[in-house]
Image (cartoon, rainbow, N blue to C red):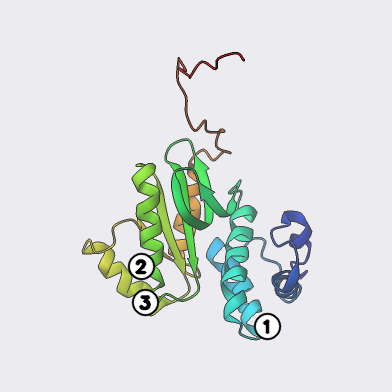
């Protein structure tokens, strides 16, 4: 079976530097992901990363984002905005965002492990929903014990912004991909910061 090195040029997700080299190694050392379910695709690529690359906290998260984006694109989900800023949501860089006609922005927070990081993801989700009331927010992780704990928090109402906790290598990831594939994704239209029928301004006196 062929490896996945062709995906590097096909999607051009990772541009340069150490992350590019690590992702190239991941794709070269993983088997063909076609005909696999989305969570199986993610599992294959993540295993290739763990087996091929030394553990590096500075790179882990970026590779995880790249793997999620690759799997989404392979399943027809796009366009995807990476490290995205949203108008009127200050000081937040969202890991991944898609934009839908039905819900507006849908954020995907990618966390290889959680610990206290879920609080940041939940705060970002609250900030997004404060402006875009119908927005949906997913937290995708590989940390199963913490995911189970957060599922309990979600059911008890302790998470204010996150809509769903998704395990990247289990069926819940397939369900997220299926949902994203069922709605209309598009590039958002340019937003005018101020729009008005009339504009009143100071008259400058001619000198």
Q: Give the residue number, with chain letter if any, for mark 1.
A: 53
Task: Name the image quarter holding residue 115.
Answer: bottom left
Q: Give the residue number, with chain letter if any, for mark 3.
A: 146
Q: Compare marks 1 and 2 and give the one earlier in the sequence.
A: 1
Q: Is residue 179 visible?
A: no
Q: Residue at x 44, y 56 (%)?
A: 175
Q: Compare marks 3 and 2 and give the one earlier in the sequence.
A: 2
Measured from the top left, where is residue 156 in percent x and y?
A: 21, 64
Task: Name the image quarter holding residue 157.
Answer: bottom left
Residue 206 vertical position relative to residue 68 in the rendered view, above or below: above
| Label 1: element kind | loop
Measured from the top left, where is residue 149 in percent x and y?
A: 31, 74
Q: Is residue 163 found left or right of 65 in the rendered image?
A: left
| Label 3: element kind | helix
Residue 165 vertical position relative to residue 181 in the rendered view, above or below: below
Q: How far is disc 3 from disc 2 in space, using C-alphas?
A: 12 Å
Q: Is residue 60 found left or right of 102 in the rendered image?
A: right
Q: Residue at x 77, y 67 (%)?
A: 5
Task: Single out the mark in the foreground, 3 or 2.
Answer: 2
Q: How far is disc 1 from disc 2 in space, using C-alphas?
A: 28 Å
Q: Compare marks 3 and 1 and give the one earlier in the sequence.
A: 1
Residue 164 vertical position relative to residue 200 in the rendered view, above or below: below
Q: Give the residue number, with chain letter if any, for mark 2.
A: 119
Please say if the residues under marks 3 and 1 sit with CB atoms less than 8 Å apart.
Answer: no
Q: Is residue 156 found left or right of 138 in the rendered image?
A: left
Please say if the residues under marks 1 and 2 sit with CB atoms less than 8 Å apart.
Answer: no
């Amino acid at each position: 079976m062929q490896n996945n090195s062709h995906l590097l040029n096909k999607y051009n997700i990772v541009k340069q530097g150490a992350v590019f080299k690590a992702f190239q190694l991941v794709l070269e050392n993983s088997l063909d992901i076609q005909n696999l379910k989305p969570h199986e695709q993610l599992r294959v690529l993540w295993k290739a990363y763990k087996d091929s690359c030394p553990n590096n906290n500075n790179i882990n998260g970026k590779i995880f984002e790249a793997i999620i984006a690759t799997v989404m694109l392979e399943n027809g989900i796009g366009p995807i905005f990476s490290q995205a800023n949203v108008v009127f949501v200050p000081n937040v860089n969202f890991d991944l965002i898609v934009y839908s006609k039905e819900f507006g922005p849908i954020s995907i927070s990618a966390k290889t492990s959680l610990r206290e990081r879920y609080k940041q993801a939940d705060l970002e989700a609250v900030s997004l929903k404060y402006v875009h009331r119908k927005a949906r927010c997913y937290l995708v992780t590989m940390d199963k014990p913490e995911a189970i704990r957060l599922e309990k928090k979600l059911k008890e109402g302790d998470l204010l912004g996150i809509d769903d906790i998704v395990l990247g290598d289990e069926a819940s990831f397939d369900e997220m991909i299926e949902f994203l594939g069922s709605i209309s994704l598009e590039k958002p239209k340019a937003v005018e910061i101020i729009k008005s029928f009339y504009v009143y301004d100071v008259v400058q006196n001619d000198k």
